[in-house]
Structure formats: C-alpha cells, structure tokens
Image (tube, rainbow, N blue to C red):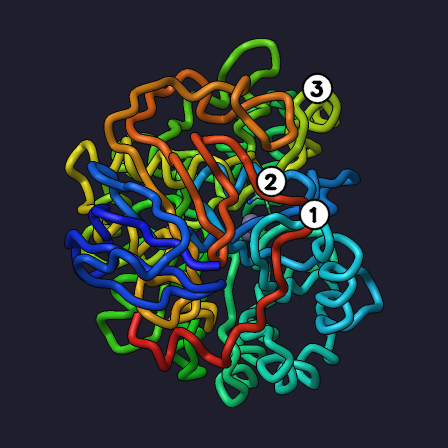
C-alpha cells in the first residue's frame, strides 16, 4: 500500500517546509517535491500542516488509585483523535510483582488487542523494596528504559524516601534507565491535609491548600540535588509551578541531566476551578494541584526556552459522578487526576501557538519529538523523515470551535477543558500508514496499536 500526501506544510521540531510525503507500507519512504505517480492513493493536504504523530509521555490507562480505576485502553480513540499516535503509559505495579512482571501484565491484559495507538511503558514503582535495585539493571534490555518513583502519597507503599531515590538513581545510570520522579513532599502534604480535615476543611479547594507550590518546589530541588549527587539523569514529571520549573532549569544549567515535563492543565487551568460549587471542584483534583496564571506564564516561557522539554497529558479517566464522589465528604479521598489525553495538541495549538507563546516547531518538539527521544523511541517515532513510522497528523488551522464533553471519547462524564475555545483541529491521522482519523473522527480499528520497546537511556544519548 502506498500513499502520497501532497502539498502540505511539514512541521518538524527543527524545520517547516512544503513538500510531498510518500508513504510505503508502515514507513515514510520519501519526502520531496513532485513525487507524483509513485503511489496508489493521493491525499491533498494543501493549506494544511503535517505534524508527526504525538507521543504522550504520560498516560494512566487502567490505573488503580484511591480504591478505584481509571478508564482503560478501550478509550484510546480519544488519544488518536487528539493527535497522539503513541502513548507511554505508566504500568502500575501490583504488590508482590516485579516491574517487568507488572509491565507484562499491564500490556498483555489491558493494552494488547485493545489499544488503537502504539504503546510503550514506564515502570511505576508502587511496591518500593530492595528488589527494585536488583531489577533495574535488566529493565532497559526489556524495553523499559524509564521508571517512575513517587516522593508523595504518604501512607501508601509507593512513597519512597531520599535513600531509595538515591540508590535507584545510582543503579539506573549504569543500566541506561532514566528515573522519573513525582516530586512533592509527601510528609508535608500529610501534615497539611490532616490540619485541613481537623478544621473541617474538607471541600475540594483544600486539595490545593494542602499542596502549595512550596511542597513541589522543595521536593523538586531535592530530587535534582539527589540526581546530581548520584551523577544520574532524572526526569521530573508533571511540573506545575514556577519554583519547581526553576529547580529543573537551574540543575540542568549546572550540568545535571535534569529534564522536565508539564501538562496541558498546568498551562491553562487555574486553581480557582477547585472552588467551583456543588462539588464540581473535584473534577480538577490532580497532583500537583492547579496553580494561578503567573505559574502558567512561567511554564509557557520554560517550554519556549527549552527549560522544560515535554508536555505530557497525565491523563486519568475518572468519572465525576461515581469516582470523584468517593471524596464528597473529604477531599483527601478524591481520586487524583484529570482526563486530558484528547486535548494535548488542541491546548498547545490554541493557547500556545496561536497566542504566540511557542512556535509550531516547539509544539512539535514538546508533544512528539522530545518525548520520543526521552523514551528511546526516536527516530522511529517523533519525526517526519524517511525511515520513520508513517505516523502523520494532517492539521487544519482554520477550524474554530469550543471544547465540549459532547465530543469527548475519553469515556468519562466530564471534560476538564469544557467551554474553552479551540483553534485548529486534527483532520486526518495515519498510524503507521493506516488511516485512523478521518474528518476529525476515529476511523481505525480496535487493537491496531502495537507494543513498542524503548532503547536504553533515550535522554542521555539523544541530545534532548
Ligand atoms: O493526579 C495525578 N497526577 N494522578 C495520577 C498519578 C500521578 O501522580 O501521576
Ligand atoms: Zn505523579
Ligand atoms: Zn501521572
């Protein structure tokens, strides 16, 4: 099967130019002018941008959290209609299973045969014990070059102390594994939460009161400091505030291989959403907490200047009615996380590119190329180049609309970005050469996604 995509404007992380793209089978075969006559099918992309398929570095499909589960890989059509062709999902580690066993279980039982996007996995340590250090050296070989540790969620078996983080970093650097960290000070949050509850402050807005920027900034500075001591790369996930961003930036500028990610909601949604009446604030309970607009501005600037490298969704598909209501009498029991996998590209385009905060090339970098590199998937993913997978987004910049749960495929009963304006939209998507979105609608097949294995140490060797 061969397809010629004609006359589009190709945007990569480093360039923008008009050319035709010849797709043969699953790969990009050639890029150039006037490639006519070499394909069976032609798609006219005049007036459209062509972006590499998005790589979402941070999804939680089928995540057990707070006594309930997020929606699973059956909702990945939401990812692909939103421009994402690859997700790197956090594989939860059930008690007693190794990271490798947990990844296999998550992949075999939940993703394979169901996902409509390609998928790779991060290990996610939820049962922190000494076997972790024995296992880390074998992970990169198994195609799992990234492992997340939590510095928060006190009282769970997954919060780690500084010693465990240090030992994991020391072990990982020899093994080609990048440690990812959820950087919030779990001890301080625990005290602040208890103080709120004792005072009867149980509404969703106290989620943010008990997780102020300081608890994130302190933990981030500590994490990158520990990485410096271990002389190991570190990736800080879901950076939400200026101070934490500055800690990552300053560590990198001081020579530490410190990288960071922010998320669509931390770029656009204000902390005031948590005060919405009638428990609507619970829709916005995620960790770290949402912040005020000055933090949003600092994060946009950090993306523009390369101080943060990645925008991941941190997608968590919890229903508001049943699941978020588990915390109706106590905000500490609200499952943490917001749905967002469908909106990453829309938010970056409308509020970043169209408002002049980032260039189109920078958008491509943070939503596709850099996450592909950091996860050892580049150049198969994250680029438009001969030999890369033909994961291509044909994007119409002229569309204007409003984001609504009515159009959501996330499988939950609300949309965190409800009512926000949307400029531009995904028109068509090819996943490895297969048309999977047409006229903005899902046109692929259940189970078409394929398991990917990341190369060791994407971050250190690929110059993010
Ligand atoms: O609120 C969040 N982010 N929930 C998902 C788990 C995590 O910490 O990433
Ligand atoms: Zn986290
Ligand atoms: Zn997360």
In the rendered structure, the answer to whether residue 249 lies left or right of residue 180 reads left
| 378 is higher (above) or lower (below) than 34 | below
Whether residues under marks 2 and 1 lie with C-beta atoms below 8 angstroms apart, the answer is yes
Question: Does the image show residue 184?
Answer: no
Q: Residue at x 64, y 38 (%)?
A: 75
Q: Which mark is residue 316?
A: 2
From the top left corner, tell me how far across and down residue 127 is, in percent. 74, 65
Determine the image quadrant of residue 337. top right
**Label 3, label 2: how many angstroms apart (C-alpha)?**
15 Å
Q: Nearer the viewer, residue 392 or 176?
A: 392
At mark 2, the secondary structure is strand
From the top left corner, tell me how far across and down residue 198 is, in percent. 67, 28
Q: Residue at x 51, y 71 (%)?
A: 179
The quarter of the image holding the C terminus is bottom left
At mark 3, the secondary structure is loop
| In the image, the residue with mark 1 has its CB under 8 Å from the nearest atom of ligand 1 | yes
Going from the N terminus, do you reach mark 3 or mark 2 first? 2
Determine the image quadrant of residue 52. bottom left
């Amino acid at each position: 099967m061969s397809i010629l995509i004609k006359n589009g404007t190709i945007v990569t992380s480093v360039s923008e130019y008009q050319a035709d793209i010849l797709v043969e089978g699953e790969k990009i075969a050639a890029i150039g002018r006037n490639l006519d006559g070499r394909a069976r099918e032609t798609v006219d992309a005049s007036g459209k941008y062509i972006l590499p398929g998005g790589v979402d570095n941070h999804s939680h499909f089928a995540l057990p959290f707070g006594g309930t589960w997020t929606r699973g890989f059956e909702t990945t059509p939401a990812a692909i209609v939103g421009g994402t062709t690859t997700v790197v999902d956090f594989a939860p580690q059930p008690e007693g299973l190794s990271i490798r066993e947990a990844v296999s279980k998550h992949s075999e039982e939940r993703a394979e045969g169901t996902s409509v996007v390609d998928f790779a996995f991060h290990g996610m340590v939820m049962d922190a014990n000494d076997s972790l250090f024995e296992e880390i050296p074998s992970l990169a070989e198994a195609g799992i070059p990234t492992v997340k540790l939590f510095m928060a969620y006190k009282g769970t078996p997954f919060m780690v102390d500084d010693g465990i983080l240090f030992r994991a970093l020391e072990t990982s650097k020899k093994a080609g594994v990048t440690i990812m960290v959820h950087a919030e000070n779990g001890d301080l949050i625990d005290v602040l939460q208890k103080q709120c509850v004792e005072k009867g402050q149980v509404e969703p807005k106290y989620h943010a009161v008990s997780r102020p920027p300081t608890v994130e900034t302190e933990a981030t500075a500590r994490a990158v400091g520990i990485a410096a001591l271990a002389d190991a790369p570190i990736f800080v996930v879901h950076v939400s505030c200026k101070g934490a961003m500055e800690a990552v930036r300053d560590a990198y500028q001081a020579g530490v291989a410190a990288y960071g990610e922010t998320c669509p909601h931390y770029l656009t949604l204000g902390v005031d959403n948590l005060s919405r009446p009638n428990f609507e604030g619970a829709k916005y309970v995620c960790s770290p907490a949402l912040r005020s607009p000055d933090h949003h501005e600092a994060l946009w600037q950090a993306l523009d200047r390369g101080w943060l490298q990645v925008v991941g969704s941190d997608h968590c598909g919890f229903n508001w009615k049943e699941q978020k209501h588990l915390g109706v009498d106590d905000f500490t029991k609200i499952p943490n996380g917001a749905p967002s996998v469908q909106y990453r590209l829309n938010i970056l385009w409308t509020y970043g590119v169209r408002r002049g905060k980032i260039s189109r090339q920078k958008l491509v970098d943070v939503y596709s190329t850099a996450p592909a590199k950091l996860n050892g998937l580049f150049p198969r993913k994250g680029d438009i180049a001969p030999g890369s997978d033909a994961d291509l987004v044909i994007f119409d910049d002229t569309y204007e609309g409003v984001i609504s749960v009515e159009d959501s495929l996330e499988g939950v009963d609300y949309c965190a970005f409800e009512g926000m304006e949307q400029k531009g939209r995904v028109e068509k998507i090819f996943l490895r050469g297969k048309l999977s979105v047409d006229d903005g609608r899902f046109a692929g097949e259940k189970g078409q996604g394929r398991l990917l294995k990341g190369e060791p140490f994407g971050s250190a060797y690929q110059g993010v």
